[in-house]
Amino acid sequence: MDIKVRVWRQSGPSSAGQMVTYDVKDISPDASFLEMIDVLNETLILNGDDPIAFDHDCREGICGACSMVINGVAHGPEKATTTCQLHMRHFKDGDVIDVEPWRAAAFPVIKDLVVDRTSFDKIIQAGGYISAPTGTAPDAHATPVPKKDADAAFEAATCIGCGACVAACPNGSSMLFTAAKITHLGLMPQGQPERDTRVIDMLQAQDDAGFGGCTNMGECAEVCPKGIPLSLIGRLNSDYRKAISKH
Amino acid sequence: MAVSGIALVLFLFAHAAGNLKIFVGNEDFDHYAHWLRTIGTPLLPDVWFLWIMRVGLLVAVLAHIWSATVLTVRAKKARPVKYAHRPKIQGSYAARTMRWGGVLVLLFIIYHLLDLTTGHLNPVGDSSRPHANVIADFAPDRWYVTLFYTVSIIAVGLHLQHGIFSAVRTLGQQTKHGERRAKAAASLLALALVAMYLSVPFAVLTGLVD
């Protein structure tokens, strides 16, 4: 199939960028979106042009590296799918596809489609941990966890920290990401000692990084490649309310 | 946002219930309006309760506008470079019109106070006969007033459809089952409120109340 892509090109963090149109010919419908960009990059390199910089790692949908807004939707049109798992068969021959980086003040563009997601690391550093004694690993069944809680914690723990929630949010808020971490750790017995300080510190780190505030619009959950539910934000709010009433 | 919003929603329901008294009779409606000035007496002097309510509402409105402004400014700062391609977002129409809908509601409240509280913009403007003000307001030849009122009330309804759910979520609603119930309840309450508010002008317009 033959398509056109309009890609955001920006040579460095402080340079101005623009959308540039490229023709991509003879792409297999079974190619992934990233493979399509690979093919385009090979052509660019052969022509002596600068290839398009983009983040990618596992290409199995589990690492959270790929980060493209495709036709205005983070990770493209398929629900619960990362860009690397999106295939060209979901587009039509002759389509013009717009590809942009995550847009957020807290995710500055490094080059082309690559953004700096250090601000997510800052949120994790502020409270995304538990206190655990060092030494040999404890027996797996030493601390009983109800099955329901384990399942719910695991559902939240599937968050790969890609940042699609921020890219999609009209407020540029990272609430779904932070809520996933709060839920994942707060449901486990091991996560209880820091439960109150965690929510306060992570929200502070989120505000300090320049993310917007949540207005419960639900865009984040629509684009989340892992299907993290919007309801986790309520859990974060509930934890926050309890934490501030104690401190 | 949530706490001030809930206070305002409670007021809206009390206000709507009071409006419906016009269906009981014009004298009953006037009686109700005059009673509002004497609530709390003799514990409180005349109209004190009314003024306490007014100050409380003003505080809630200002707190609501302040929170909305902070959120809007933060949202603008959080995305300095806009997307070149941005399809209509997948959230509800109500959710994405909260800000401009809120501005419209504010303009309507200002007009509404000048019309039916102070009487400046009312063709009758007689505070001793509130029913006459209402009936003159929604007379068929003043269709544009009824139209503006209707559009504004629908804006209030949309604002509440997202607002009530959002407030409940902000205060900690966290189950998926509860989310469906909260959304259904928000839609139902918003619809009930719109129906209560629109019943009066349309009753006047059609001559049901005169």
Image: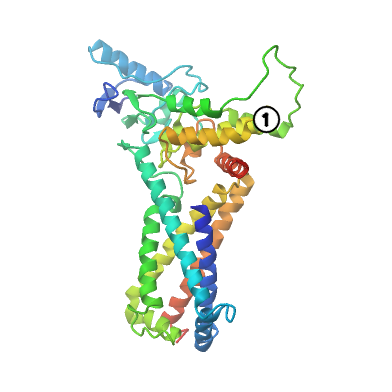
Residue at the image point whose x is 59% and y is 32% from the top? A156
> Which residue sits furthest bottom?
B27
Q: Quadrant of the N terminus of chain A?
A: top left
Q: Chain of mark 1?
A: A
Q: Which is more toward the observer, A68 or B66?
A: B66
Q: Which is more toward the observer, A79 or B2?
A: B2
A186 relative to B40, above or below: above
Q: Which residue is mark 1?
A: A188
A42 relative to B71, above or below: above
Residue at the image point whose x is 39% and y is 24% from the top? A116
Kind of residue at badge 1: Met
Question: Is residue B190 at all visible to an observer of this figure?
Answer: no
Question: Is residue B84 at all visible to an observer of this figure?
Answer: yes
Percent coordinates x, y for residue B95 in the rendering: 45, 50
Percent coordinates x, y for residue B37 in the rendering: 51, 80
Residue at the image point whose x is 77% and y is 21% from the top? A142
Percent coordinates x, y for residue A238 in the rendering: 60, 43
Q: Which is more toward the observer, B42 or A226?
A: B42
Q: Quadrant of the C terminus of chain A?
A: top right
Q: Which is more toward the observer, A65 or B29?
A: B29
Percent coordinates x, y for residue A92 in the rendering: 36, 31
Q: Secondary structure at mark 1?
A: loop
Instruction: Kindly indicate the quadrant of the structure image that contains residue A100.
Output: top left
- What's the image's color scheme? rainbow
Dot 1: within a 10 Å radius of its alpha carbon, few (fewer than 14), some, or many (20 or more) residues?
A: many
Instruction: Tally the numbered discs.
Output: 1
Instruction: Kindly indicate the quadrant of the structure image that contains residue B154.
Output: bottom left
